[in-house]
């Protein structure tokens, strides 16, 4: 894009942040946490699975920023790797579920007819199914592990995207540019993927950012009740579970991982809010 | 309108059937043997087999499913594999408990979430707005299981101003079962001490359950209000000289209400399905934990019964929301 | 708008009012002479047939009684419902004479007919504790207060399982049968026993209240609590909070990490009971490379037993010595106790052809997030030092049991425990190490040794106590040398209670039961 456009966008971003300072805070939090996660292997002072039985259950100190756990493992290192794992898992879930959702929603929306009905009925069934129950059941059926937790969450999440995209496709289907493309003889698939979908990016992106937090929470929740990551994996929800019984005395064990989950999700939500406003053409125009 | 409702009801039936099939298939894949659980950990193989026959678990899959559906039509939701009690009687005890939590949560949302949203809409950019955005992000970001534990430790452990959990204080006998909700039943009994006790026990757990919803609805209300306040008819109302209070709370809110209202009604079903974490932390004997247990030990009738109840409530509340939407917004009619 | 405000204000007022009331209302209930106990699981039934389930048995100990009771101080059986008993025909026939003044809570008298009925019912239902009475095939009523038990095969230790047969009211059951269910539905919320306390209220997931049975045959002279309230609280941290505040008198599930804090707290005392329990890693001896005894020995040398006792048991328990608990009679205390020795373990592995490990084990354990998970994680870390990878499989117990029964199942190692239902070494050794037990689930190691089988089979009918002792000691020695399992520890059973609770005594046969009748309280603050 040319310089003028670029400058305009930069100005819009600046104004956007000025109007919504929380959005900037959210972005900063996100960036910090993501960096911590990416560089975990370099930053972590100790190995997350190394025992140090002599020092077990020690409170936060200079040596161990977040204290140590039941086996003497350094909690700070565990949390760092936990961030990494949570991010990896959540982003994978996000990508897979949105991809499946988008493809099925788009095809269903465009094809219409019986196919559409069928896909949407399936979507409705999944949407009506209490999500936590579905996730628990699937997870258990596959044997609890972080992979099955991811699979379970993907299955509960894709219908949401399918529905959104189908809605967008339906409304786009009747627009002028689609009619034009059709009359030019462009085939169905191309129309869907090259013309309609790019216009659906906006709502999807926003949804995805907002969903990041929810997915992190869901995965952590599943690990918390024992249907997620297996020990000794330092997944954040699992860490809170491990610290659960000690909340009165060795409070650091459950508090820090929980706090990190909190920050991550809040950051994602604040930024997601900002992004939604920013990408809204009506609001954008006023920036 | 009537046609609409009938169509929706048929749709509900379709969904419930779909869910039951899906759940049945998944539970079949679950590891573990329900016959063994029922027979007991030390049962000899012959005993396990006899229990298996007793519970009809030796028949092929589709027969089991059809038998189950058949029983539903005859009004029997089956017998729990674990407790040997009819599922319906278990549900009668546990569903109201979860319901009480959800109702409590709803009250929090309506009486705190909505006003917060309205106030922050009135003063955008000011402290209230930032405060509400922050609370919103906090509420939607905090892991329920974490904040619940911390709140319990603080409010019960350190400050001792709230009970640790449970539905009643120790030694108190629950009121006779009318609705199953202790607070309401205590009122029916005119036992106000019992009501007070049940009410206080309800406060924290329902608040924790409500947190994410509170945040969400407050946000939604705020957005909705902002949109509505910019509309032409509001300008007209103000020009006519109506007091600001009337404009905001009666005219604007009524229209802004529809969006959060619909979302909210949908959330009721969600809440019901997600009570397990709160129930486990606050020792609140409800449906969530029941279903969780059931999944772990492959107690299909229990899980099925509980899930159907939740789904039913969810769909009914959706239907209700749509009807309400229609009532609130005269432009829409079915 | 005004209306909304009014509602809001009213709501706030209600909240504040209830609050204040709750905070300042001191116990307007009379809690003196009431024992409040917190535990984490409520019983699925009050049916005496399910006495094998510790959660059910806990409440049973309050409302039901058996013919005899095990006395942990004397290590002998003592009369209870039965005032005396005798054995005939070398352990094939047992005669019991009953006390005559016992009544059930429903008012009916306890007679020999109730004993016979209890047995017949148990036999027909064929679940729960029935499996322990396999050799009992007939119970005969001789007269109103005399009853005879006939065994299909002589069994010296049989008498020791009698404390688990809780007598149920025949008329009570018959009055509450629906749909041919042996009154099991009724018994899900009621009890039909003769014990000192009656179940007066039960709210599943919340609490159960037991009140004094005025016509209890032993009478109420002396010091006894008059009411028992079981409060169901899942979180051990919450239980701890309640105990420290004095809101409950006893907690059943203290976490091992809280024990030290309790030891330091002057208002709380710990009751540690010596149990018959043993913790194991069962090694599936049919899986490579566990079929090589050197590998098994190396694994036994790799485990950090001291860390286990400190971390998993909270310091409460001792390392195991051989395949049965050190407190069991006929325990062989000449057996060697293994200590962690990584160098020796490495050497043994090298000898077996695996100098750097290089293989993977699947380790199965139950209770995701609980004690056994710690054991599993600890072992995983120990074995990592030998170059062995451990893949953890956390699961529910019924699933694990299925795998233990299946010859071709995946797991190589199982974290297991054995709770003995009687004060005799036979059940532990037979259930876990007899070749016929392979496929029943308890013999998870798939162990078989004909010499052990032979000694077990002769030991069960051996009348000569001296010879019996020698035989059982020999059995333990053989098993210890074969290392089909790693013998980890004998945990103590611990509960924590306030200082004013007196009279509690742990009974290893009625594991985890609280005989409230024996308990009395000093003045409660």
Image: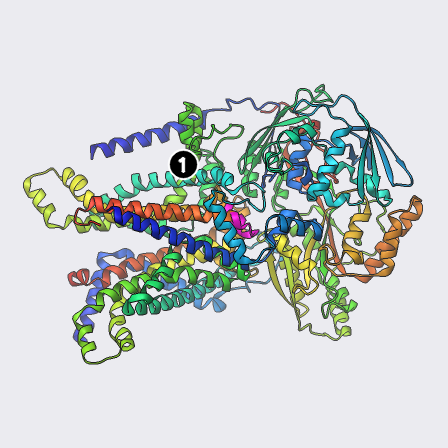
Q: Percent position (x, y) of residue A183? A: 18, 78
User: Compared with residue A14, is residue A195 higher up or lower down, i.e. above or below?
Assistant: below
Q: Chain of mark 1?
A: B
User: What coloring was used for the rendering?
Assistant: rainbow
Q: Nearer the viewer, residue B222 or B167?
A: B167
The image quarter containing residue A263 is: bottom left
The residue range painted magenta reads B290-301
Q: Percent position (x, y) of residue C422? A: 78, 42
Q: Percent position (x, y) of residue A29? A: 36, 60
User: Compared with residue A15, is residue B8 higher up or lower down, i.e. above or below?
Assistant: above
For the question of whether residue B135 can be seen, the reply is: no
Q: Percent position (x, y) of residue B267? A: 35, 48
Please give the residue where the numbered disc 1 appears in the rendered image. Answer: B203
Q: Residue at x 74, y 26 (%)?
A: C110
| Magenta span contains residue B11 | no
Magenta stretch: helix, strand or loop mostly: helix
Please give left or right for residue B115 compared with residue A126 in the image.
Answer: left
Dot 1: element: helix
Please give left or right for residue C196 compared with residue B220 in the image.
Answer: right
Q: Residue furthest top?
A: C221
Q: Residue furthest left?
A: B240
Please give left or right for residue C128 compared with residue A76 in the image.
Answer: right
Q: Residues within 10 Å of mark 1 (few under 14, many from 20)?
A: some
Q: Residue at x 36, y 55 (%)?
A: A266
């Amino acid at each position: 894009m040319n310089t003028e456009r670029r400058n305009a966008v930069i100005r819009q971003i600046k104004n956007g942040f000025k109007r919504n300072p929380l959005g900037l805070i959210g972005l900063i939090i996100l960036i910090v946490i993501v960096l911590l996660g990416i560089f975990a292997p370099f930053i972590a002072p100790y190995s997350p699975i190394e025992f140090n039985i002599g020092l077990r259950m020690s409170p936060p100190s200079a040596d161990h920023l977040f204290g140590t756990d039941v086996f003497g493992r350094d909690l700070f290192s565990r949390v760092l790797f936990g961030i990494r794992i949570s991010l990896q898992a959540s982003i994978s879930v996000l990508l897979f579920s949105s991809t499946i959702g988008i493809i099925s929603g788009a095809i269903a929306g465009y094809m219409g007819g019986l196919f559409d009905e069928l896909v949407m009925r399936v979507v409705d069934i999944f949407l009506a199914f209490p999500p936590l129950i579905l996730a628990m059941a699937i997870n258990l059926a596959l044997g609890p592990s972080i992979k099955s937790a991811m699979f379970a969450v993907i299955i509960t999440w894709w219908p949401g995207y399918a529905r959104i995209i189908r809605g967008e496709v339906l409304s786009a289907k009747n627009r002028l540019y689609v009619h034009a493309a059709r009359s030019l003889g462009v085939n169905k698939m191309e129309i869907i993927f090259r013309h309609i979908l790019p216009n659906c990016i906006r709502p999807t992106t926003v949804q995805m950012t907002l969903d990041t937090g929810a997915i992190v929470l869901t995965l952590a929740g599943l690990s918390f009740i024992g249907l997620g990551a297996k020990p000794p994996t330092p997944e954040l929800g699992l860490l809170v579970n491990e610290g659960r019984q000690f909340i009165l005395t060795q409070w650091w064990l459950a508090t820090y991982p929980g706090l990190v989950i909190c920050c991550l999700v809040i950051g994602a939500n604040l930024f997601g809010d900002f992004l939604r406003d920013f990408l809204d053409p009506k609001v954008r125009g006023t920036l | 309108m009537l046609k609409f409702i009938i169509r929706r009801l048929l749709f509900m039936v379709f969904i419930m059937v779909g869910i039951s099939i899906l759940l049945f298939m998944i539970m079949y894949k679950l590891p573990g043997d329900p016959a063994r659980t029922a027979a007991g950990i030390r049962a000899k193989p012959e005993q396990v087999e006899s229990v298996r026959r007793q519970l009809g678990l030796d028949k092929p899959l589709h027969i089991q499913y059809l038998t189950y559906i058949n029983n539903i039509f005859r009004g029997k939701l089956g017998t729990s594999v674990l407790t040997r009690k009819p599922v319906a009687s278990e549900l009668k005890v546990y569903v109201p408990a979860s319901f009480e939590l959800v109702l409590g949560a709803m009250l929090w949302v309506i009486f705190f979430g909505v006003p917060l949203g309205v106030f922050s809409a009135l003063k955008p950019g000011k402290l209230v707005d930032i405060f509400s955005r922050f609370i919103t992000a906090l509420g939607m970001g905090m892991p329920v299981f974490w904040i619940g534990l911390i709140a319990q430790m603080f409010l019960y452990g350190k400050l001792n101003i709230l009970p640790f959990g449970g539905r009643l204080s120790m030694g108190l006998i629950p009121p006779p079962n009318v609705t199953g909700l202790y607070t309401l039943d205590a009122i029916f009994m005119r036992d106000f001490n019992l009501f007070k006790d049940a009410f206080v026990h309800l406060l924290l757990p329902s608040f924790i359950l409500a947190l994410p919803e509170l945040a969400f609805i407050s946000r939604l209300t705020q957005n909705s209000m902002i949109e509505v306040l910019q509309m032409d008819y509001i300008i007209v109302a103000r020009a006519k000289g109506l007091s600001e209070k009337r404009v905001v709370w009666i005219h604007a809110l009524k229209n802004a209400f529809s969006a959060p209202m619909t979302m909210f009604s949908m959330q009721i079903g969600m809440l019901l399905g997600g009570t397990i974490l709160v129930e486990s932390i606050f020792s609140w004997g409800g449906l969530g934990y029941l279903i969780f247990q059931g999944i772990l030990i492959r107690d299909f009738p229990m899980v099925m019964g509980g899930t159907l109840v939740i789904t039913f409530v969810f769909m009914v509340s959706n239907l209700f929301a749509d009807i309400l939407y229609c009532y609130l917004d005269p432009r829409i009619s079915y | 708008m005004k209306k909304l405000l009014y509602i809001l204000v009213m709501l706030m007022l209600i909240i504040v009012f209830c609050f204040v009331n709750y905070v300042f209302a001191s116990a307007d209930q009379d809690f003196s002479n009431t024992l409040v106990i917190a535990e984490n699981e409520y019983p699925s039934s009050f049916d005496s047939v399910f006495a094998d389930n510790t959660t059910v048995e806990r409440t049973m100990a309050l409302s039901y009684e058996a013919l005899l009771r095990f006395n942990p101080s004397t290590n002998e059986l003592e009369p209870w419902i039965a005032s005396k008993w005798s054995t005939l025909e070398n352990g094939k026939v047992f005669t019991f004479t009953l006390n005559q003044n016992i009544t059930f809570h429903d008012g009916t008298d306890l007679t020999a007919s109730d004993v016979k009925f209890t047995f017949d019912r148990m036999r027909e239902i064929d679940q729960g504790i029935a499996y322990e009475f396999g050799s009992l095939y007939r119970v005969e009523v001789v007269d109103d207060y005399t009853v005879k038990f006939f065994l299909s095969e002589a069994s010296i230790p049989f008498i020791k399982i009698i404390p688990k047969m809780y007598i149920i009211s025949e008329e009570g059951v018959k009055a509450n049968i629906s749909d041919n269910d042996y009154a099991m539905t009724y018994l899900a919320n009621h009890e039909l026993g003769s014990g000192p306390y009656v179940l007066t209220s039960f709210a599943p997931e919340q609490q159960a209240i037991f009140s004094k049975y005025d016509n209890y045959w032993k009478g109420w002279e002396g010091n006894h609590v008059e009411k028992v309230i079981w409060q169901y609280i899942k979180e051990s941290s919450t239980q701890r909070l309640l105990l420290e505040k004095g809101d409950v008198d006893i907690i059943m599930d203290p976490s091992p990490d809280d024990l030290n804090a309790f030891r330091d707290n002057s208002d709380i005392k710990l009751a540690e009971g010596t149990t018959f329990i043993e913790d194991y890693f069962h090694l599936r001896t049919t899986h490579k490379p566990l079929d090589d005894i050197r590998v098994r020995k190396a694994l036994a040398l790799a485990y950090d037993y001291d860390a286990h006792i400190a971390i998993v048991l909270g310091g409460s328990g001792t390392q195991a010595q051989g395949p049965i608990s050190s407190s069991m009679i006929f325990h062989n205390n000449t057996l060697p106790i293994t200590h962690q020795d990584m160098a020796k373990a490495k050497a043994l592995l090298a000898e077996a052809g695996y100098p750097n490990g290089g293989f993977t084990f699947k380790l199965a354990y139950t209770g995701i997030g609980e004690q056994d998970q710690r054991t599993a994680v600890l072992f995983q870390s120990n074995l990592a030092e030998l170059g062995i990878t451990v893949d953890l499989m956390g699961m529910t117990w019924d699933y694990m049991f299925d795998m233990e029964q299946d010859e071709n199942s995946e797991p190589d190692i199982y974290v297991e425990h054995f709770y003995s239902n009687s004060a005799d070494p036979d059940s532990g050794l037979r259930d876990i190490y007899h070749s016929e037990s392979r496929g029943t689930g308890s013999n998870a190691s798939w162990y078989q040794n004909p010499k052990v089988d032979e000694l077990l089979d002769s030991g069960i009918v051996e009348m000569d106590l001296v010879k019996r002792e020698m035989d059982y000691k020999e059995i333990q020695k053989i098993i210890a040398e074969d290392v089909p399992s790693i013998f980890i520890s004998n945990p103590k059973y611990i509960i924590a209670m306030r200082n004013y609770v007196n009279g509690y005594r742990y009974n290893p046969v009625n594991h985890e039961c609280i005989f409230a009748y024996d308990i009395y309280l000093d003045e409660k603050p």
